[in-house]
Amino acid sequence: MDLSSFTVLHAEGQRLVKGWFNRAYELKDDDNESFEGFIFAWFAVNGWAACVTAKDRDLEYIKFLGRSLDLREKFATLLANDTGFFLVANKFHEFWPIFKAQDIRRAGHHGLNINNRKEIIDYYFKNGISAYDPICWQFHQSAGEEIPLDWPHTLHAIYRVRNNLFHGEKSAHSEMDQLIVKLAFQTLIRFFRGAEIL
């Protein structure tokens, strides 16, 4: 994987990707546009990722991006040096794991009247909702440690938000909460802009 390969992408491809990203970035401070902003940001990341990994399928390029030492270093550096990014990423981290919205809908658990995230997480586990990201969340909990706030774990949490949003989940439930989408969007957009990737 070569992060610099995006710079040699044909001009029209770069224009499209940067245009989507800039459109998303313009919405970063508008709480009412987090869903639209996330969608535009993901279009941009999708195009950029396909270019730098030479993989077209989401699951393939997500694997490559998560293993990238360059992206891990950029993420860690931004966490250490950008207070705004640190606060947003940490707040998003507090909502992990992000559960699969389709499973919640199928099990009839949408519309929970619970405001505390820890209670929501406990409720889903007790009621058999077992698909979530980052997938190693329970492993870290069982080991008595907090799941790391790093690039691979964050990428997988954001990708779960992406799947929940893109796969037609229109019903109201916690995993489509506006705050979760907003924090995923803010983390994604601030990382790619702050690390000067897009």
Image (tube, rainbow, N blue to C red):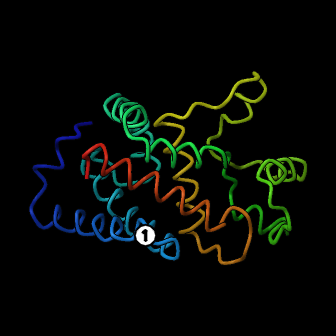
The residue carrying pointer 1 sits among few (fewer than 14), some (14 to 19) or many (20 or more) residues within 10 Å by Cα, namely many
Q: At which x and y percent is residue 191?
A: 38, 47
Task: In the rendered view, tell whether residue 60 sits above or below residue 45.
Answer: above
Q: At which x and y percent is residue 37?
A: 43, 69
Q: What is the residue that sits farthest to the front in this orientation?
A: 83
Counting every numbered tag in the picture gives 1
Q: Residue at x 52, y 56 (%)?
A: 184
Q: At which x and y percent is residue 40?
A: 38, 69
**Nearest the eye: 82 or 51:** 82
Q: What is the residue that sits farthest to the right in this orientation?
A: 126
Residue 165 relative to residue 118: left or right: left
Task: In the rendered view, tell whether residue 150 sits above or below residue 106.
Answer: above
Q: Residue at x 80, y 47 (%)?
A: 118
**Nearest the eye: 152 or 107:** 152
Which of the image's four quarters has the N terminus? top left
Q: Residue at x 39, y 56 (%)?
A: 189
Q: Residue at x 46, y 37 (%)?
A: 151
The residue to which callout 1 is attached is 37
**Nearest the eye: 178 or 83:** 83
Residue 164 relative to residue 102: left or right: left
Task: In the rendered view, tell whether residue 79 sits above or below residue 161.
Answer: above
Q: What is the residue that sits farthest to the top in this orientation?
A: 143
The amino acid pointed to by label 1 is Gly
What secondary structure is marked by label 1?
helix
